[in-house]
Amino acid sequence: MGTIGEAGEFGLIARLTRRLPPSPAVELGPGDDAAVIAAPDGRVVATTDLLVEGRHFRRDWSGPYDIGRKAAAQNLADVVAMGARPTALLVGFAAPAGTALEWAERLYDGLADECREAGASVAGGDVVAAPQITLAVTALGDLGGGEPLTRSGARPGDVVAVRGRLGHASAGLALLAGGRDGPAELIAAHRRPQPPYTAGEEARSLGATSLLDVSDGLVQDLGHIAAASGVRIEIDSSSVPVAEILGPDGLRHVLTGGEDHAFAGTFPPDVRLPSSWRPVGTVAEGTGVHVDGREPPSGGWDHFRV
Amino acid sequence: MGTIGEAGEFGLIARLTRRLPPSPAVELGPGDDAAVIAAPDGRVVATTDLLVEGRHFRRDWSGPYDIGRKAAAQNLADVVAMGARPTALLVGFAAPAGTALEWAERLYDGLADECREAGASVAGGDVVAAPQITLAVTALGDLGGGEPLTRSGARPGDVVAVRGRLGHASAGLALLAGGRDGPAELIAAHRRPQPPYTAGEEARSLGATSLLDVSDGLVQDLGHIAAASGVRIEIDSSSVPVAEILGPDGLRHVLTGGEDHAFAGTFPPDVRLPSSWRPVGTVAEGTGVHVDGREPPSGGWDHFRV
C-alpha cells in the first residue's frame, strides 16, 4: 500500500479524510482553511494535547488503531470533565515519510471510532513530515446551556466521588514494562481507555460542584481540585474501588495511576449518587489531599505508597 | 534563568500563562481541563497546524519571539480566510528539557502579541518534553452571523483579487538560505508575516464568493479555489503586484512563494474594490490556474517559472 511520503501531503489527506464519517455538528469538515462546528450554547469548550512517540505511546506496545482511540479519548474526556458534550476533534499528525500509509489509516480509524463513542467526529487537521510521530489533538464541546464544571467549586462538606475504571491502565503499563502480555484486560486498558462519556452530563444533573478527568492519578488530580477550590480532599482508602484483577499493588495503581480517564468530582453533602458513582471521600477545610487522614510521603506522587 | 526541565511541567505552565493577557472572548482560560471561549454566532471556526523545528522554522534563522508570532499568524490567517474574526488560540508546545526557559517565554510573548493584533488571545494548551521543538497551534473564530467564505463559491466572470504582501517571505527565505542577512525588510517578512486581519470582514462586505489565505503560493492556492469551485482561474501577471525590492525573481516569488499569508478571493463581476484589494485576474469556465493564458509547466509548482 506504500508510505505516506509516496502518497504526498494531498494524497495522504484524501486517504485519511475519506475514513472520517460526517456528523451533524460539523457544518464544514476537512478541505478548507478551517472547519465550522456547531456551538449552539454560544460558547465552545476547547482543549489540546500533544502526544509524542516514545513518551506518550510506543508503537511496539500499541497498534495505530489503539493509539488513535487513546489520543482521542484523553481529549474527549477533558471536554466531558467540563460538563460538556464533545462535538469535534482536530488532529495534527506528524510522521516520517517512510511511515506506512496503512498505519496512518488505522490511526485515523481509531480516532474516528473513539469520536463516535463520544458523539463527536474529526472535523479537520494537518499532516506534516517529521522525524518522530507526534499527534496534536484538539477537542471541542458544547455546554448545552449549563455552566462549566471547573476545579474550583468544591466546598467543605461536599462528597468526593469517582466514575469509571481506576488503576487498570497503570497496571497494564506496569505489565508491559515488565515484559508481560497479560492479563489481557489490563493490557487492553492501557492501550485503550474507556472514559464514561456520559459522566459530565450525569455530574451536572447531580449538582456537582467540581469535576475533572483522572489523567495523572486520583491523588494528584484531586490535588488540583483541592488547590483550585482552596480546600482539603480526604480520601477514605477503604471506599476506593480496587478491582481484584489489579493484584497486590491494586490500591497504589488506583491512587497514583493515570490514563484510565475516569472522572472525579465533588457533590453537595445531600447528594444521592447512583451506583455508577462511587463516594471515596469528603471535602474538608485545609489544603492538599489526605489518604486515611495522612499526608502522602514527601517523596512525591510518583513514589507515593500507602 | 534555567531550563524548562528545571521549571517542571507545572512550573513552566505557570511561567507561560502569566505572560498571557486575558481577553473578553475567553470566559475560562488556562488551568482547568479545558478552556471556555465565546462563540456568539452559535458556530465556531477551528483550524490547527503542526510546526516542526527544522521543517517549519529554524532557531538559527528566527528567534523565539518571531517563531511565536509566525506560528500564531498562520493559524489566525486561516480563521480570517473563512470570513471570521479570531477569538482564541490553543498552543501545544513540545521541547527538550534543556530548552532555556527564557526561549519558551519569548515564544509565548510572540504568540500573545500576534493574537492581540488579530483581536484574540491564548486560551490554553499543553506542554510536553520531546526531542524536537514542535508547536501545535489551534485557532478558533466567530463568524458573526455571516456564512463562511469557503473555496467553493467562485463563479465564471468573478474578479480575482488579493490583499496583503506577496512574495516577501519567500524572497527573505531565499536570502537566508543563500547565507545573506538583508535586505532587512525581506528577512523580517520571512520571520514575521503580517496578514491583514481585517481582510475576512472586508471580503465579506465586498460580497466575496470565495476566500483563502496564501500559504503555499498564489498559483497553488488559487488552484484550490479552482478545484473546489469547478472553475478556471486566469491570472494576468501584469496586474500582479510585484514589489521592486523583490528583485529580478520578484514575479516568481509572488506567484509561487508562500508564507506571507496574504488573502486571495473571488468577487462578483461588478465589485468595486477598495485600493487595498488588487485585482489580479478573472474566473473562467474550465479547470486549473492559467497565467497569461498559459498553463504552468508540468514540472510542478515548486519548479514553476514564468
Image (tube, coloured by chain):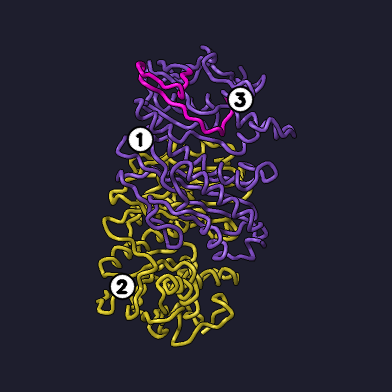
Chain colours: A yellow, B purple
Q: Nearer the viewer, residue A182 or A150?
A: A150
Q: Which mark is residue A276?
A: 2
Which element carries disc 2, helix, strand or loop? loop
Contact? badges 3 and 2 (CB < 8 Å): no
In the picture as drawn, the residue positioned furthest to the right comes out as B179
- Can see residue A113? no
Amino acid type of the residue that numbered disc 3 sits on in the rendered structure: His
- Magenta stretch encompasses residue A159: no
Q: Which mark is residue B253?
A: 3
Q: Quadrant of residue B35?
A: bottom left
Disc 1 chain ID: B
Amino acid type of the residue that numbered disc 1 sits on in the rendered structure: Pro
Q: Residue at horizontal 51%, vertical 49%?
A: B112
Q: Sequence order check: which comes first, mark 3 or mark 1?
A: 1
Q: Position of residue A234 (x, y in %)?
A: 41, 82
Q: Residue at horizontal 36%, vertical 61%?
A: A82
Q: Which residue is mark 1?
A: B148
Tell me how far mark 2 sits from mark 1, CA to CA: 43 Å
Q: Which range of residues does the magenta coloring cover?
A: B256-280
Q: Nearer the viewer, residue B83 or B129?
A: B83
Circle 3 packing at 10 Å, graded few (<14), some (14-19), many (20+), is: many
Task: Note whether B281 is above or below A88 in the view shown.
Answer: above
Tell me how far mark 3 sits from mark 2, CA to CA: 62 Å
Same chain, labels 3 and 2 = no
- Magenta stretch encompasses residue B270: yes
Image-based side of A188 in relation to A164, left or right? right
Circle 1 packing at 10 Å, graded few (<14), some (14-19), many (20+), is: many
